[in-house]
Structures are given as C-alpha cells and as structure tokens.
Amino acid sequence: MQASGQLAGKVAIVTGASSGIGLETAKLYAREGASVVLVARRAAELDRLAAAIEAAGGRALALAGDVRDEALARDAVAAAVERFGGLDIAFNNAGAMGPSRPLHEIEPQEWQDVLQANLTSAYLGARHQIPAMLARGGGSLIFTSTFVGYTAGFPGMGAYAASKAGLIGLTQVIASEYGARGIRANALLPGGTDTPMGRDAMASPEARAYVENLHALKRLAAPAEIARSALYLASDASSFTTGTALLVDGGVSVHRG
C-alpha cells in the first residue's frame, strides 16, 4: 500500500504492537505520517519494530509493559506528549483469548484475567488517553473487539466474548460522552485473522480449515487487511463515524453456507 499521508502530523499509541494486527497497524500508521508509541509486553520485538520504522523515515518509541497496569497507560500517554507533542489516536488493540472451556469449568481467576486483559486494560488506556486528546481538541479512540459475542456465540469462549462485547458498550458511551468535544470512539471487529493468537486457537490444519469455511470469503484475513480498517477509523476519512462496531469479518457474521 502506497502511503498517502493520511496521518501526517498525528501522534498515535498502538497497544499489542509486537505482533499481528497491532504490528501491521503501527507500521501502516507510521507510513501514513504518524509518530507512534508502541506498547506491548515483549521489549525486543518492540525495539526491532521501532528501529524498522525509524529506518524507513518514521518516528517511533517503544514502551514495554503489561496493559493491565495503569502505570503503563499513563506512561504511554506521557511519552506521546513529551516525545511527540500530544496524542491524536489510540488503537487499544492488546488482548488475550483465555481458556477455551465450557463456562462452568472456567475458574474465577481465569475469568478475571481475561476481562482485565481485554476490557479493563481498554478502560485504563482510555482514562489517560482522553484528557490528552481533549488538550488537542479531539482525537480518535479505537478498540479491537470481535464478532464473537456480537454476531455469534462460540462454545468455550465465554470470558473472551463477554470481555470483547463489553468493549462495544464502552465505545458507545465514550462516543456519546465526548463527541461534542471532538473525540470519536469506534470498535473494530475482525473476523478470523492469521495472527499468532489466531493460530494458537486453530492448532491443527482441520481446525484452520473449519474456521476458514465459516467465512463467506472462505479464508482468514491477513493482519494488514485489518490494519487498513484501523487506518480508516484513525483518519479523517471517518470524520463522521463514531460509536460504531465496524465488522471487518470476511462475511462470517452473515454466512450460513
């Protein structure tokens, strides 16, 4: 994809940036002109990504840590402001699948761990991102949700579905609370995507083929395809889009064949 400067002069935070959708989105945001704060647990991977972005002429800062830690959310915003001058975009993308078992077999601590990784982390991020965006006169918040728990219920994914569905409610409230002050909030709902997390959930060729067949397009998404939708929500191309649950799911929500 040739850069068109859609994010020129913007500053973005991307969580879960060390692999998959987050990595591809961070690279794309940088190519489109944004300065990017890269957040994930794996420091070495983040450092390599930051170096690659800067070698290509972009601007990036790596910040390793756990998104469940409020101090990391605060530090990421501080880094955006101190290093790059402010914050315009936050792609709250980091998350966890959690155990794949029937609900009555999921331990309370396992349930809490998934909710903290997927939902509470997004709240903590937004809690610090919103004031920085208000100081800039507005911005775009994006949360990675999923079609699971929104258009389909998959056995064994109770904690994951509940936490990701909660992100849609959070998105709607943020859009309503802060729209008049220039902040947009949207949830991005990918279908099956060829990421490390996705491959872990499809441990055999048969499992992968099954998931691919659920989609109308009969394949998984490449992470870069989801990144392009994250770019749309970050850019002025979506200037009148807020409070949405944007399905980018290869038709899995409508396909019944």
Image: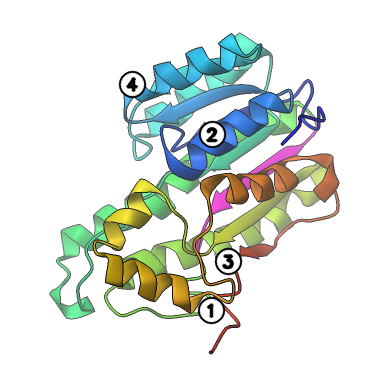
- The numbered dot on residue 14 is 2
**Amino acid tagged 3:** Asp
Where is mark 4, residue-wise? 43
Where is mark 1, residue-wise? 151
Which residue lies at the image location 37% right of the left edge and 56% below the top edge?
198
Between label 3 and label 2, give the one nearer the viewer.
3
Would residue 189 be counted in the magenta stretch? no
Q: Position of residue 105 (x, y in %)?
A: 14, 75
Q: How many labels, in total?
A: 4
Where is mark 3, residue-wise? 249
Which residue lies at the image location 67% right of the left edge and 46% below the top edge?
228
Which residue lies at the image location 60% right of the left edge and 74% below the top edge?
251
Q: Taking 87 as reference, is 82 above or below it?
A: above
Q: Taking 195 as reference, is 153 above or below it?
A: below
Q: Secondary structure at mark 3?
A: loop
Based on the displayed image, in which of its 4 quarters is residue 8 positioned? top right
Q: Secondary structure at mark 4?
A: helix
Along the horizontal axis of the image, is 88 left or right of 50?
right
Q: Secondary structure at mark 1?
A: loop
- What whole-number distance in Å separates the C-alpha atoms at marks 4 and 2? 14 Å
Q: Secondary structure at mark 2?
A: strand
